[in-house]
Image (cartoon, rainbow, N blue to C red):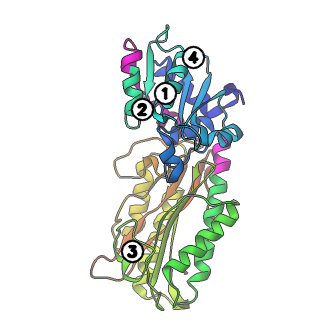
């Protein structure tokens, strides 16, 4: 797909042009995924050990041409999914003859930078200091000493803030898979005597089936007294549930490069919640609903925090942590819903709203409520469809 048909890159291109870049070299897993459409895998397992470097995206600015520099072990997947103009594979491992993966990585990077015109009239190179490999930094210093480096992470964050229609569709799908996980939990907690490991296995299996393949999953499943404080991540563990336990699951999975992040709290075993369990559970749910309702174009991120805080105060409680965050190619994006964030809310933003409240070390219950919501011109559209666990 030509890069001109890639709306994500066209947004990033405009932001990088405003930052004064001629070429950008993107090294963060999230931003390479965002620009290319190729779901850059996490560096785990044998493939990560074979490759000296991770995938990189190199793009010219204003005339918009892009290369994906990728380990040869990922070439087939990159060919199937990359939306950039060209692929530049580098050798990693061969069982018949020796390979120098470090030299292969540097050679591929140098050839691509030269093809992009770095050092030949293109003098300002956008990089990401947090993730730029040392080998890449050394190559730039030695081979292109006259190049001026520009930090482009703020430009990419700006480009990613409002989601494209393609991104919204991917986040909607991710939220639907999260619904399946939470609906599975709701069924499992109807009966006590279930091991947390077994619950987690069944929940993730249901999400894998919905996705059609295994997907990266992070988060926690905690029951009983471990819900009374936040020690994320803190489960699952080898613990069997008891009637009247709290069960809190905060789970995120990545599908086609985009994340879900949703939380629900239940009372185990079909036991009616106690008055305190209702107070904490309903407070978290009401705070989530209030914060989602506040996410309207023209509002500020802090307005959602304040709405959640007011809901907690109605129950005589204080919020224990932030009220949420944006979500996209990373599970936790800016802006975050905190008391000081003045970021304007815009249509096309997608948030995971997650206020929580916990009894603390002397208690045995805590509740967090989190759903995904799309900001539209007409107001918030709640993407998550699972039902709250502490029933009214």
In the displayed structure, does residue 117 sit left or right of residue 206? left
Q: Which residue is mark 1?
A: 25
Q: Earlier in the sequence, mark 4 or mark 1?
A: 1
The residue labelled by disc 4 is 115
Mark with earlier residue (1, 3): 1
For the residues bearing labels 2 and 1, Cβ distance under 8 angstroms: yes
| Residue 380 as seen in the image, left or right of residue 273 | right
Residue lying furthest left: 362
Q: Please name the residue that numbered disc 3 is placed on.
A: 315
Q: Which residues are magenta?
A: 141-170
159 is within the stretch colored magenta: yes
In the image, what residue occupies the spot 43% across and 72% down?
A: 235
Q: Which residue is mark 2?
A: 128
Q: CA distance from mark 3 to mark 2?
A: 45 Å
Q: Is residue 294 magenta?
A: no
In the rendered image, is residue 387 in sight? Answer: no
| Residue 174: quadrant of the picture | bottom right
**Quadrant of the snapshot with the C terminus:** bottom right
Instruction: Report the mark closest to the observer, 1 or 3.
Output: 1
In the depicted structure, whether residue 342 falls above or below residue 104: below
Of circles 3 and 2, which is in front?
2
Decide which of tag 2 and tag 1 comes sooner along the chain. 1
Image quarter for residue 368? bottom left
* Residue 223 in view of the camera: yes
Task: Label 2, secondary structure: give it.
Answer: loop
Residue 375: x and y, percent? Answer: 58, 49
Q: What residue appears at the point 31 percent right and 82 percent down from the top-left corner?
A: 363
């Amino acid at each position: 797909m030509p890069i001109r048909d890639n709306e994500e890159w066209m947004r990033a291109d405009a932001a990088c042009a405003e930052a004064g870049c001629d070429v950008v070299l993107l090294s963060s897993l999230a931003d390479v995924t965002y620009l290319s459409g190729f779901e850059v895998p996490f560096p785990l397992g044998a493939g990560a050990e074979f490759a000296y470097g991770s995938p990189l995206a190199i793009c010219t600015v204003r005339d918009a041409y892009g290369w994906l520099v990728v380990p040869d072990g990922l070439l087939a997947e990159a060919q199937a999914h990359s939306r950039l103009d060209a692929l530049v594979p580098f050798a990693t491992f061969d069982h018949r003859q020796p390979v120098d993966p470090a030299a292969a990585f540097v050679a591929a990077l140098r050839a691509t930078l030269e093809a992009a015109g770095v050092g030949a009239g293109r003098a300002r190179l956008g990089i990401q200091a947090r993730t730029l490999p040392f080998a890449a930094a050394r190559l730039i210093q030695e081979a292109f000493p006259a190049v001026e480096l520009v930090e482009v992470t703020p430009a990419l964050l700006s480009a990613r803030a409002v989601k494209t229609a393609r991104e919204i569709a991917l986040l909607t799908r991710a939220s639907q898979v999260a619904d399946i996980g939470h609906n599975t939990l709701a069924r499992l907690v109807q009966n006590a005597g279930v091991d947390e490991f077994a619950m987690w296995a069944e929940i993730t299996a249901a999400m894998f089936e919905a996705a059609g393949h295994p997907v990266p999953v992070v988060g926690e499943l905690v029951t009983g007294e471990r819900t009374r404080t936040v020690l994320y991540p803190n489960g699952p563990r080898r613990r069997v549930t008891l009637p009247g336990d709290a069960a809190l699951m905060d789970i995120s999975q990545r599908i086609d490069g985009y994340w879900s992040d949703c939380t629900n709290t239940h009372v185990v075993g079909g036991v009616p919640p106690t008055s305190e369990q209702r107070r904490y559970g309903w407070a978290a749910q009401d705070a989530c609903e209030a914060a989602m309702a506040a996410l309207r174009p023209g509002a500020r991120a802090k307005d959602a925090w304040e709405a959640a805080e007011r809901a907690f105060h109605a129950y005589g409680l204080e919020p224990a942590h932030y009220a949420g965050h944006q979500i996209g190619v990373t599970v936790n994006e800016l802006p975050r819903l905190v008391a000081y964030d003045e970021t304007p809310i815009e249509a096309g933003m997608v948030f995971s709203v997650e206020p929580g409240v916990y009894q603390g070390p002397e208690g045995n219950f805590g509740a967090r409520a989190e759903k995904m919501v799309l900001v539209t011109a007409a107001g918030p559209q709640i993407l998550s469809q699972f039902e709250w666990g502490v029933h009214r």
